[in-house]
Amino acid sequence: MLFIGAIAFSPRIPLPIMIPGRCFDLRVEDIILSGLLFFWLLSLFLRPRIYLAPLFKAIGIYVSIVVLTTGIAVIRFDLNLPRVFFYFLKELEYFLIFLLVANWVRSYSDLKFVGNAILTVGFVNAVWVGYQVLTKRMVPLFFVEAPAGVYQPPHLLESYGPGLFGEVSPLSVGGFFLLVFLLALSYTLVSRPGFRRRLCVLLSATFLVCVLLSGSRVSTIGVIIGALVFVRYWGNKKSVMIMGLGFPVLLGAVLWRKSNVFYSMEHIFNFKHYVVSLAFRQQEIWQPLVSYISENPLLGLLGFGRSSLGFFPGFPEEAHNHYLKVLLEHGVFGLIAFLWLLTVVISLSRRVHKRSRTSISKVIGGASLAATVALSVGALVQDVFKPVILNELWWVFVGLTAAAYRIESRSITEKNNV
């Protein structure tokens, strides 16, 4: 619960570590994760027992390619080593979160506890969003000023609408509420009629409103993609429930947008913005980046290395297409490994959702499946697998899915042995 709360509430804490074009942000969950890793390693010395999960091979191959291509790029292009190190360390941290969750969640009660914890921190952040709406002051509750001389990316401190307790970046805010919305919706579809289902419906609607208020178009589209995944796997009766939940919320949002109360609504529901944004990405970002690869076939094979975006002259900070980003940084083999990793996550989530005998496992598997598909689609127009809060929570989802798979498999084995 402490770690989940840290992800949801922790602000960026800029440290005076000079990295070209990069601000080194420490978060509370980084400190907690270090402590958890220490105790986990200590427990492994006392009792060697580690569950590598079905994703371990895909993660291992992807990380190996990242290390190889980045090592070659450091030698050839003189990439800044501290910048490379901290970018790579953050991605390793995501995988560590996955392993810790997959190993420490060992029972159905653990799954329920973590799932409820995620909904709880989501609701608390939604209350803070409501406060910002009422007061019309769109600011985080926790904010740490960067030390003098430390680079602070301005786009990470601006937002179209309300933010989380410690975060205002629209994609991070919208992505956070997208994930808790999909979890609440998954609970709604599994729960029997009664108080619990009504509560889950209320939470789903609340989180959906927060997604819209965030102003993140990628997260809003992710809501639609995730809902379609649920429609695909839950059938007609559940589909009616999903549409019945979303229609009044979306209708209210459109009417709210007409009143011009928040720029975030105007930003989302003015479809001209989508056309202009896609045209800008295609002409000003994607074409120049693709030209670098086509003009240098060998570099297209090996990539320019981790953190090369935003470092080399002419390279933007974001590719606004995560697959293009991976291709540029780690070449064709890196992109294949990344796509395989996503495929394995989707396959595992689908298996847990379809074959589980308990409702909590179905909830976790369904939420992880919908979230992964939604993020995979969103990655076509944004670097969605980069924001910290979004990806920390997503890897918690994936870790819970791996844990559910293990628990369900063990349960089946025990029944067969009886």
Image (cartoon, helix red, strand yellow):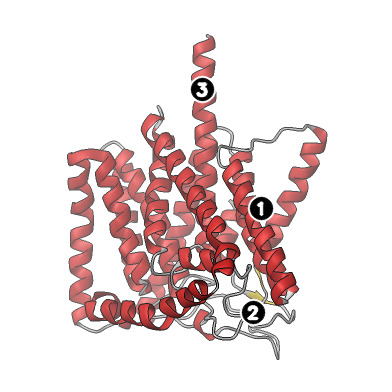
Amino acid of disc 1:
Ser
Choose the circle earlier in sequence order: 1 or 2.
2
Q: Residue furthest top?
A: 418
Task: Relative to 117, say whether 136 is above or below.
Answer: below
Counting from the top left corner in percent of width and height, residue 213 is at: 34, 72
Name which residue type carries label 2.
Arg
* Front position in the image: 191 or 69: 69
Where is 268 relative to 185, above or below? below
**Residue 296, relative to residue 148: is it above or below?**
above
Q: Position of residue 411 (x, y in %)?
A: 51, 22
Image x and y of residue 328, in percent: 54, 69
Residue 183 placement, left or right of 333: left
Q: Earlier in the sequence, mark 3 or mark 2?
A: 2
The residue drawn where x is 59% and y is 86% is 313
Placement of 156 over or under 370, stated as above or below: below
Residue that carries the numbered disc 1 in the rendered image: 64
According to the picture, the residue beneath numbered tag 2 turns out to be: 22
Side of 396 relative to 278 (left or right)? right
Q: Quadrant of residue 21?
A: bottom right
Q: Residue 144 location, x and y as percent?
A: 63, 80
Q: Secondary structure at mark 1?
A: helix
Mark 3 vs mark 2, CA separation in Å: 47 Å
* Residue beneath disc 3: 411
Image mark for residue 292: none
